[in-house]
Image (spheres, helix red, strand yellow):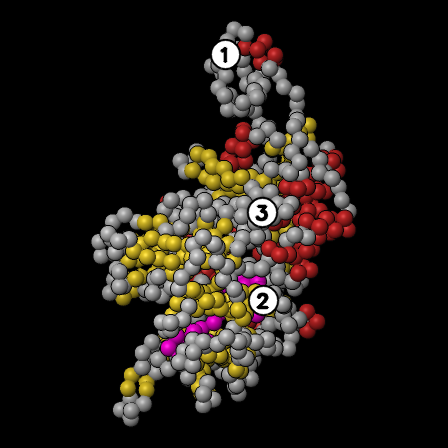
Amino acid sequence: MWKRSGQMKIQSGKCNMAAAMETEQLGVEIFETAECEENIESQDQPKLEPFYVERYSWSQLKKLLADTRKYHGYMMAKAPHDFMFVKRSDPDGPHSDRIYYLAMSGENRENTLFYSEIPKTINKAAVLMLSWKPLLDLFQATLDYGMYSREEELLRERKRIGTVGIASYDYHQGSGTFLFQAGSGIYHVKDGGPQGFTQQPLRPNLVETSCPNIRMDPKLCPADPDWIAFIHSSDIWVSNIVTREERRLTYVHNELANMEEDPRSAGVATFVLQEEFDRYSGYWWCPTAELAPSGGKILRILYEENDESEVEIIHVTSPMLETRRADAFRYPKTGTVPIGIHTHAGTDFLLLVFWQIQVDEVRKLVYFEGTKDSPLEHHLYVVSYANPGEVTRLTDRGYSHSCCISGHCDFFISKYSNQKNPHCVSLYKLSNTEDDPTCRTKEFWATILDSAGPLPDYTPPEIFSFESTTGFTLYGMLYKPHDLQPGKKYPTVLFIYGGPQVQLVNNRFKGVKYFRLNTLASLGYVVVVIDNRGSCHRGLKFEGAFKYKMGQIEIDDQVEGLQYLASQYDFIDLERVGIHGWSYGGYLSLMALMQRSDIFRVAIAGAPVTLWIFYDTGYTERYMGHPDQNEQGYYLGSVAMQAEKFPSEPNRLLLLHGFLDENVHFAHTSILLSFLVRAGKPYDLQIYPQERHSIRVPESGEHYELHLLHYLQENLGSRMAALKVI
């Protein structure tokens, strides 16, 4: 077992490292003197005793988990999002704009449309709280509450949507037409156009149809809002919401029972585009209409047509377990389908945009979000593109912001939080300075959502950083045990993701999504989170560090971070370290136990990739290259191929996986188990029969957290866990 000895330097052989004892100030250099041994012996400190977490039964843990969340419910209301500013053309009225947005209804926790009025003037001596007014009257969107069609369920999985109700909406400002999908229906309603602004909730109008299956991805025609388009059975249809005329535009999909014989689709983004590139649509209305010779309008739609006949079909157990059937999916495994970037006039057609950008053409300004001031905080910035100069930050330091700017660039909304304070949503007015019309300043205007304040029984983590031996500064978060006792060393849990496109360590509130980390700290664990090389918002060199070698560098950074913390805090017990993560974090949990079983006592791996040639092209080849050109990288990065390197002691490895996972297929876990069995290695397994890649069923979520706490208790933190090791 690896043991920590202080960061000491001895200049002579007379006082060797074995004789050196830790000082009270770790990291202080100690130099040899004639009385070296005598001085060290006089400074000998009592050996720290291990702290053991209390053992609870499964039922006791279940009650404890419920109690820790008694203040958690009111935090779960999702902040308003998807804002739309609409100018009010009423010079004598008290309001300049109306803003529309999606938010949770207090009555039934469904996402629905609200609006608030922006006053022209405010009393600067008082804080104005904008009232939320429901745009829609209560209506029954679906007969089966919480049940979704296969298409809806898969789209929600790709978008990582956890709420119920309206997920998005389309709006046409000229006519005031809203269009949205709710349940199995498409609805429209009007507000803010020629008919004026409502003061009462409106009853949505159902877009009637003859289509037998679910209609997806509805969009208003910007050139004529009487027309909408949608996808039905992998083809594009249009419908007139006034005349109720309905027409099928494309005829590429035949709705055959055999998927293999029906590989084409129109207007639908493929799995890779949705999962890996965040594009969920495959068609776009032309914003303008052409005049036809007959005097009518010509409306155009640009769409993509896909032929996936060369894409492998995989079979995943159906969510309807009682049918004993399997669902079929097209899934482009690594190395099987060529993925290219088309170019036009020398410019890449495929462009990845990381932050929102808005252009103010009147003032010749560009607004954008970025991390110029700190990699841990997102801020809104503005700069002139006519006379490029200094970039100006508009949002306040000490928080991380996510912003939405009005179309006229005279207001912006910021949703912001920090480690101690939950999300707050505020409205700011933008104006020019007197001497420079291009210099924009903000003025607080109103609050849309006030922060709930510090959460009872919640202790936020501390952010730390250290200089890695690789030359990069690495950032982490430390959750200290809530009742920290001197003279004790505590079991430590490393919570990990570590993959591309994700940043866990930042100055945002963690008390909702990562509340389980606070629960672990309340039970007596040290919890550590570190963003290793390869995580996002740190620049190309940092993010590209594991190019062609995923799985080979991340654990080095994590272990170095643990050892750094152990040199700063003597309560961290490096002989009792567990690691847990999901998806890429599950993959790295396996890598950690395989590569550094001397450091990690227990690994709990959720939905892990175990064989990169089983994962999709759009993700894997982007970072690892083609498997034919990187055989060594694929071998070293695939834990299933190295199962013999896992420890031979039981109670050290727990695998968790949703049986319906169509992203990281359950086959990843199956093949790892097969190789573990061949190698004679022990493991524990927990399957969630009705879950996909994300756990969504509340009972499954509760069971997962219970299992996590119980497994750590029994195999890492308790006195019983220590006896098992002996």
Q: Amino acid at mark 1?
A: Glu
> Label 1 crowding class (10 Å Cα cut-off): few <14, some 14-19, many 20+?
some
Seen in the picture, residue 282 relative to 340 is either above or below; the reply is below
Disc 1 + disc 2, Cβ < 8 Å: no
User: Mark 1 or 2 closer to N-term?
Assistant: 1
Mark 2 belongs to which amino acid? Answer: Ser
State the residue at coordinates (39%, 48%): 371
Screen quadrant of the C terminus:
top right
Q: CA distance from mark 3 to mark 2?
A: 23 Å
* SS category of the residue bearing label 1: loop
Distance (Cα) linking label 1 and label 2: 69 Å
Q: Earlier in the sequence, mark 1 or mark 3?
A: 1
Front residue of 63 and 71:
71
Residue 469 image offset from top left, x and y in percent: 43, 33
Pointer 3 local density, CA inside 10 Å: few below 14, some 14–19, many at least 20 = some
Query: Along the line of sight, which residue is nearer the eye, 662 or 384?
Result: 384
Q: In the drawing, does residue 637 fall left or right of residue 516? A: left
Q: Residue at x 29, y 89 (%)?
A: 292
Report the residue that reaches farthest toward the bottom. 294
Stretch in magenta: 159-178
As measured in the structure, the alpha-carbon distance from the residue carrying label 1 to the one carrying label 3 is: 50 Å
Badge number at residue 454: 3
Between residues 141 and 102, which one lies in front from this camera angle?
102
**Which mark's residue is nearer the viewer, 1 or 2?**
2
- The residue labelled by disc 1 is 32
Between 58 and 227, the residue placed more toward the observer is 227
Residue 327, percent across and down? 59, 71
Q: Position of residue 507 (x, y in %)?
A: 48, 46
What residue is disc 2 on? 105
Locate residue 421, reporting x and y percent.
54, 48
Mark drawn on residue 215: none
